[in-house]
Amino acid sequence: MDEYLDDNCTYTLAAMRDMVLWDLGVSLGTQTIINKLIGKLYTLKQLRVEPMTCNNDVN
């Protein structure tokens, strides 16, 4: 599950559940995913994706 979030941190719990089902053939509940991620250092206030040009040296 960590790899999924490393690839794209905007995945929802439902999307991660579906990916685990697709990749591993295991059906997990969203609470199981929450319990797995509890010890991680993820904090979300507001997630936003910034274009690459925002932090460009030219700007």
Image (tube, rainbow, N blue to C red):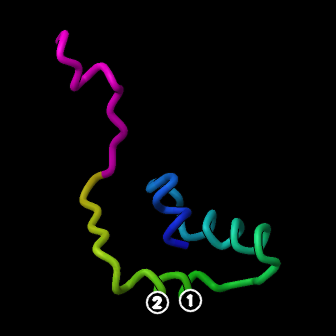
Q: Which residues are magenta?
A: 47-59
Image quadrant holding the N terminus, namely bottom right
Predominant secondary structure, magenta span: loop
Residue pictured at 77% horizontal, 76% vertical: 24
Residue 50 on the magenta segment: yes
Image quadrant holding the C terminus, namely top left
Residue 21 in the image: state x and y as whole percent.
76, 74
Residue pictured at 30% horizontal, 19% vertical: 53
Q: Which mark is residue 58?
A: none
Instruction: Determine which residue is flagged by label 2.
Output: 35
Residue pictured at 46% horizontal, 89% vertical: 35
Q: Are marks 2 and 1 in contact (CB under 8 Å)?
A: yes
Residue 55 shown left or right of residue 18 in the figure: left
Are there few (<14), some (14-19), or many (20+) residues within 10 Å of tag 2? Answer: few
Q: Tell me how far mark 2 sits from mark 1, CA to CA.
A: 5 Å
Instruction: Determine which residue is flagged by label 1.
Output: 32
